[in-house]
Image (spheres, coloured by chain):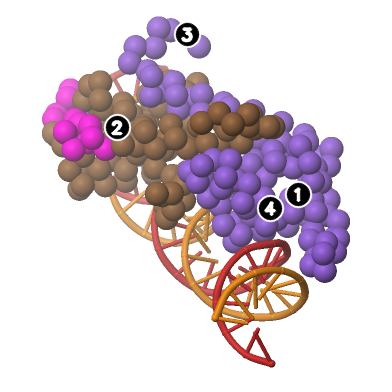
Chain colours: A brown, B purple, C orange, D red
Amino acid sequence: MATTNPSFMNGVPELLVLRLLRGREMYGYEIVQEIREETGEVVSLGEGVVYPVLHALERSGAITSDRRPVGGRSRIYYSLSPTGAARLIELTGLWSRITGAVQQVLVGGGRAGLV
Amino acid sequence: MATTNPSFMNGVPELLVLRLLRGREMYGYEIVQEIREETGEVVSLGEGVVYPVLHALERSGAITSDRRPVGGRSRIYYSLSPTGAARLIELTGLWSRITGAVQQVLVGGGRAGLV
DNA sequence: CCTTATACCTCGAACTGAAAGGTATAAAGC
DNA sequence: GCTTTATACCTTTCAGTTCGAGGTATAAGG
């Protein structure tokens, strides 16, 4: 089943967000910075990417939100739900298969019938 | 045109095509099938993706074409130019950095201050 | 005060890549 | 002889993502 439709390389922002939320609950602004930092700025998703992803994930039940005032300011903390954990596993596997496939071509040369 | 940000995850078709052409000259139809085969159908780029990529690469001087009749039918063989070889190196490095960065987040957990 | 940092948000533009369709020849099947 | 299948090229249209820019509001620092 060669997953065709959605542009085979997409959903990386979703994957990253889910993965970060696996460890602890976080709020949007924090996620934006965390991705930037942890990837050494190689991947830098803006708020215009992260917030919509968060909203879509919440709508689909993958994460839950909890609005909390912190020092006078208001933050929305998101946590991973079981659904989200499953989705994370799914996306991680997909990512792994795709990068593996690309790597296969990159190394290629004369694929010595491994598999 | 001001090269907007090309979505950090793009250009994989271009990368794959360039890589395949590194080994030998190939024609479009062949490239389509080769990608399908070599990735075990995980990545399956249609002709609607490959042909435009080939044309863009030729326009940019990364590859050259040579139309040849083979058994009554006409094929356009493409070869990598020095420019294309450089582009391949560039894209390979980019791909490597990006997948590395994503991996960094995926493994993450407690990045022990490496850098 | 006024700028900077935090923290949220949305919309429009841009770009990809997917699908589908279109042409033409050769070979194989009926 | 005719039709289907495989080869081989190509383009256009469409949908989905991501990006950038902009917009609101509070708190803190100069």
Badge 3 amino acid: Leu
Question: Where does label 3 land, which residue?
Answer: B114
Please tell me which residue is depicted at 61% across the width and 59% down the height of the picture: B47
Disc 1 to disc 2, how far (Cα)?
A: 38 Å
Q: Position of residue A61 (x, y in %)?
A: 17, 43
Q: Please state the chain letter of the residue tagged with numbered disc 4 in the rendered image.
A: B
Residue A78 lies in the magenta-colored region = yes
Secondary structure at numbered mark 3 = loop
Q: Residues within 10 Å of mark 1 (few under 14, many from 20)?
A: many
Q: Please state the chain letter of the residue tagged with numbered disc 1 in the rendered image.
A: B
Q: Is residue A112 visible?
A: yes
Question: Where does label 1 land, which residue?
Answer: B26
The mark nearer the N terminus, 3 or 4, is: 4
Please tell me which residue is depicted at 59% across the width and 61% down the height of the picture: B48
Question: Where does label 4 land, which residue?
Answer: B30
Q: Position of residue A85 (x, y in %)?
A: 22, 32
Range drawn in magenta:
A68-87
Badge 2 amino acid: Ile
Question: Where does label 2 land, which residue?
Answer: A89
Q: Are marks 4 and 2 on the same chain?
A: no
